[in-house]
Image (tube, rainbow, N blue to C red):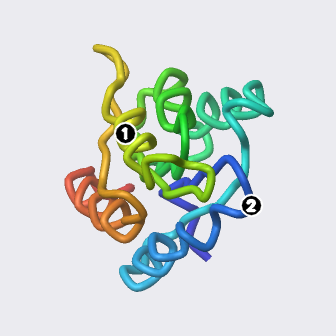
């Protein structure tokens, strides 16, 4: 089995179902991935450790799904030089139906970029990850 190239990270197990489209798309393209749950608010040290160790573990791109304040993609981007793709997720607790998450993810400060796809559009995150991977040199 191939080593994962894409890390998919969410803050809560309940987000897995909305991120499934990314996993399915990566599978369809033959791109190995890993999935983990770590919260920017509840387990910030674990998020930092994941992001800091990602490149050493062979990951090339990180996809982060997050709702509400949607801090996860930005926190991850602050701890890695790898490309980070944020997927804003709808939440039953949101008063803005995912727009709050979208705005949180796209409003990263200068020097901490996070690519962002549409609300609940994990498939596009995987397509973007595949396109970025296609630009990287093949492993020797």
Residue most toward the front? 95
Q: Nearer the viewer, mark 1 or mark 2?
A: 2
Location of mark 1 (residue) = 83
Relative horizontal placement of residue 14, taking residue 3 as reference (left or right)? right
Location of mark 2 (residue) = 13
Does residue 139 show up?
yes
The percent coordinates of residue 36 (x first, y second) are: 69, 55
Q: Residue at x 35, y 36 (%)?
A: 103
The percent coordinates of residue 117 (x first, y second) are: 30, 54
Asked whether 54 or 10 is in front, the reply is 10
Q: Are marks 1 and 2 in contact (CB under 8 Å)?
A: no
Q: Residue at x 39, y 36 (%)?
A: 105
The percent coordinates of residue 127 (x first, y second) are: 29, 67
Relative horizontal placement of residue 67, taking residue 131 as reference (left or right)? right
- Circle 1 SS class: loop
Q: Residue at x 58, y 40 (%)?
A: 54
């Amino acid at each position: 089995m191939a080593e994962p190239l894409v890390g998919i990270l969410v803050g809560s197990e309940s987000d897995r179902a909305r991120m499934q489209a990314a996993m399915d798309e990566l599978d369809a393209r033959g791109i190995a991935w890993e999935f983990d749950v770590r919260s920017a608010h509840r387990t910030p040290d674990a998020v930092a450790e994941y992001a800091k160790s990602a490149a050493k573990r062979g990951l090339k791109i990180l996809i982060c799904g997050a709702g509400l304040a949607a801090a996860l993609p930005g926190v991850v981007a602050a701890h890695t030089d790898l490309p980070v793709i944020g997927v804003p997720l709808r939440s039953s607790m949101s008063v803005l139906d995912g727009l709050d998450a979208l705005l949180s993810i796209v409003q990263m400060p200068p020097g901490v970029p996070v690519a962002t796809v549409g609300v609940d559009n994990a498939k596009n995150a995987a397509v973007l990850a595949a396109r970025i991977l296609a630009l990287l040199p093949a492993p020797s």
